[in-house]
Image: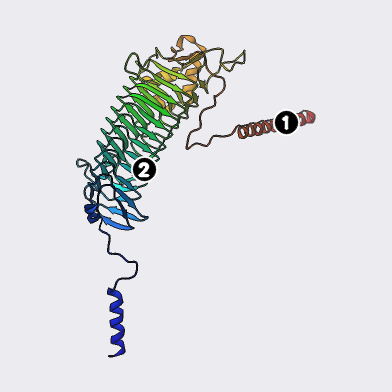
């Protein structure tokens, strides 16, 4: 046999014979069809074609690094139709684009699901739970489709699914993270960026929102038609879209807002008919509202709100009333302790850190802006300063105060730490202050010496 022919036969045998350790191609659909309750299916690295449906209760899908389920641009990629299923470590991508069909990356249709450490990308809706009570969404990353915001689906949508935990997820470039008719949820440690409503609640009671970061959304958090809502140590920053609310409350009762940061929004907080019920409350304690166009904007009928130990820092307009008027029936101090206002011009003779005269929100120009919003273009201009100076000089023109804090704080209180913000240390602040004082002293000394030389030359 010629040597060249022998080499060809040997090479062909190597190509068609099994290699040690090599297995047949993994078929995810076949593995799911053969699975029993409680099985663990390890999905190997590679691209596996969707759509995929899980119908076995108690099943676990465990993705190895690089395991991808690709929907091919049609329909929902992964549907979970059985309870107690866990999906972990997978990349889910390329759903359809039909809003009316609600094409999704992951659609959960049964209780007690656990979806953790997955990446959902280029899907219309990211994760969609329907009647998936007591489910857990933890550590997932959801990246929306490159579509106009009006054409996107929600990054996370929870529908009629009480008791859900949404924790440590990162949602980018989607529409909303929305809770509809889903009571008793906890949302903790999530980051939501560049969407419409960072967190959106409709007809959902007993919601707890802790240490979430809402950044560069049109609205940070919108609470609507619910009761028993608690917000603690959240960061709501750069909400400057068409609405531009850091936090908005509409027809909600029993709201407790503690230790949050609302920074550089068009409106830090917007309040519409909240609370609704006569025995309900809205309470704001230990929050920072800083560098917003408007600190808090109220509708004129809002009552039974309580504010204490908050910091209102350099908002261009601290308090606004939509359409003008005066706020009545709200408390701006508790136990003779009010809030810190960066534009307070009072004094503290007895050194108890509480101003001896009330803080009153009175600005003729602000009152004009509430009736003529186009005047906001000239805010902080010489014209607005001149109007307010004239109103102070001639009390007949002084407008009625929009609100009064009878016990304003002289210094800003210490606030709880919030994720996503680096708090400047007191030592650093002291160093800056001392540096500025030293510079001022040098300027003053140089001026004194220059004046002395001028006098001697004369």
Q: Position of residue 175 (x, y in %)?
A: 31, 39
Instruction: Tell me if residue 11 comes above or below residue 344 in the rendering.
Output: below
Residue sitting farthest toward the top: 396
Q: Residue at x 33, y 70 (%)?
A: 19
In the rendered structure, which disc, 1 or 2, sits on the residue that comes first in sequence?
2
Q: Evaluate whether residue 374 shows in this view.
A: no
Instruction: Tell me if residue 58 comes above or below residue 262 in the rendering.
Output: below
Instruction: Tell me if residue 6 comes above or below residue 230 in the rendering.
Output: below
Q: Residue at x 63, y 33 (%)?
A: 427
User: Mark 2 = which residue?
Assistant: 172
Q: Nearer the viewer, residue 15 or 176?
A: 15
The image quadrant of residue 449 is top right
The image quadrant of residue 155 is top left
Classify 10 Å Cα crowding around label 2: few (below 14), some (14-19), many (20 and above).
many
Tag in front: 1 or 2: 2
Q: Residue at x 31, y 76 (%)?
A: 14
Instruction: Tell me if residue 140 comes above or below residue 269 in the rendering.
Output: below
Q: Tell me if 126 is positioned left or right of 379 in this view.
A: left
Q: Secondary structure at mark 2?
A: strand
Q: Which mark is residue 289?
A: none
Q: Residue at x 33, y 51 (%)?
A: 62
User: Mark 1 = which residue?
Assistant: 445
């Amino acid at each position: 046999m010629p040597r060249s022919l022998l080499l060809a036969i040997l090479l062909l045998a190597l190509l068609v014979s099994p290699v040690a350790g090599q297995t047949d191609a993994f078929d995810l659909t076949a593995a799911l069809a053969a699975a029993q309750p409680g099985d663990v299916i390890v999905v190997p690295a590679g691209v596996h074609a969707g759509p995929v449906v899980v119908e076995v209760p108690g099943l676990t899908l465990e993705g190895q690094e690089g395991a991808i389920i690709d929907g091919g641009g049609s329909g929902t990629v992964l549907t979970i139709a059985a309870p107690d299923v866990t999906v972990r470590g997978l990349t889910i991508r390329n759903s359809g684009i039909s809003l009316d069909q609600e094409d999704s990356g992951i659609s959960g249709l049964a209780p007690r699901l656990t979806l953790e450490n997955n990446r959902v990308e280029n899907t219309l809706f990211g994760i969609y739970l329907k009647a998936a009570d007591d489910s857990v969404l933890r550590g997932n990353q959801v990246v929306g489709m490159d579509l106009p915001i009006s054409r996107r689906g929600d990054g996370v949508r929870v529908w009629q699914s009480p008791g859900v935990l949404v924790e440590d997820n990162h949602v980018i470039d989607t529409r909303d993270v929305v809770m509809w008719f889903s009571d008793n949820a906890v949302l903790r440690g999530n980051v939501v960026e560049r969407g419409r409503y960072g967190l959106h609640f409709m007809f959902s009671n007993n919601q707890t929102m802790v240490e979430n970061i809402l950044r560069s959304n049109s609205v940070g958090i919108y609470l609507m038609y619910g009761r028993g809502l608690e917000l603690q140590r959240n960061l709501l920053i750069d909400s400057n879209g068409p609405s531009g609310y850091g936090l908005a409350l509409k027809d909600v009762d029993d709201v407790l807002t503690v230790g949050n940061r609302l920074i550089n929004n068009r409106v830090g907080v917007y309040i519409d008919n909240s609370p609704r019920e006569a025995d309900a409350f809205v309470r704001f304690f230990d929050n920072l509202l800083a560098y917003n166009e408007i600190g808090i904007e109220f509708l004129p009928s809002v009552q039974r709100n309580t504010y204490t130990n908050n910091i209102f820092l350099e908002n261009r307009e601290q308090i606004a009333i939509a359409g003008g008027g005066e706020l009545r029936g709200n408390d701006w101090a508790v136990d003779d302790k009010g809030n810190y206002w960066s534009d307070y011009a009072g004094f503290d003779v007895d050194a108890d850190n509480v101003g001896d005269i009330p803080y009153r929100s009175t600005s003729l120009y602000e009152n004009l802006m509430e009736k003529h919003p186009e005047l906001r273009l000239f805010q902080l201009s010489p014209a607005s300063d001149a109007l307010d100076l004239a109103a102070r000089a001639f009390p007949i023109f002084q407008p009625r105060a929009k609100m009064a804090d009878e016990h304003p704080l002289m210094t800003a209180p210490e606030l709880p730490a919030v994720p996503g913000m680096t708090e400047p240390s007191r030592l650093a602040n002291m160093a800056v202050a001392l540096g500025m004082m030293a510079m001022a002293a040098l300027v003053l000394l140089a001026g004194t010496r220059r004046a002395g030389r001028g006098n001697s030359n004369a």
